[in-house]
Image (tube, helix red, strand yellow):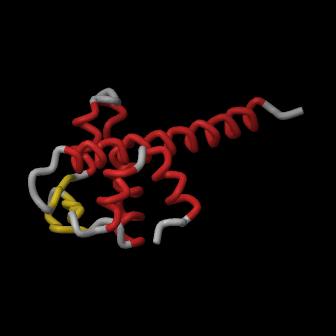
Amino acid sequence: MYSMAEIKTLSRTYSDKIDSYRVRLITLKFLKDQVQNAKGNLITFRPSKVAQDLHIYDRQDLRAKTVLIRTFLDDLVQRGYITVVKRSARGKVYGLYKSNKFWDLLSTYEPDKILELLETEKIQ
């Protein structure tokens, strides 16, 4: 049998994984909406804007979720799917160009399918 401390640790780990998955999915939904409504060749955004625009978290939880969003966006930068357009005291401004293959993915697939492709690294 598990002790109460072990159960809490296991449930927190499971909860964190679900939370992380949800944040990545919501971030992709935000990007998909931005791509669909884009008028030009570049969309720019900050992690805090993603969290605030979606109104999914209360004020208290917003900062922690912004960190998760930033981590996911940094991973996308590292993979070459998006770029850092600007760095300032307020943080990074991320950008996605229309000429990028990721733009095409966002306009073609649903966020859950994109996340699946990202996790299996099947994006060429």
Image coords of residue 19 (percent x, y): 50, 39
**Camera-side residue: 124 or 31?**
124
Quadrant housing the N terminus: top right
**Camera-side residue: 119 or 105?**
105
- Exactly how many numbered labels are in the figure? 0
Judged left or right of residue 16, residue 53 is: left
Judged left or right of residue 96, residue 7 is: right
Find residue 8 and report its image quarter.
top right
Image coords of residue 45 (percent x, y): 20, 53
Farthest residue to the front: give it: 108
Find residue 65 and report its image quarter.
top left
Find residue 5 and report its image quarter.
top right
Farthest residue to the left: give it: 39
**Camera-side residue: 109 or 4?**
109
Image coords of residue 53 (percent x, y): 22, 36
Q: Which residue is drawn at 33% across and 67% down?
A: 101
Q: Which residue is drawn at 36% across and 33% down?
A: 61
Q: Which residue is drawn at 17% across and 56% down?
A: 43
Image coords of residue 68 (percent x, y): 41, 49
Q: Which residue is drawn at 54% across and 66% down?
A: 121
Judged left or right of residue 27, residue 14 is: right
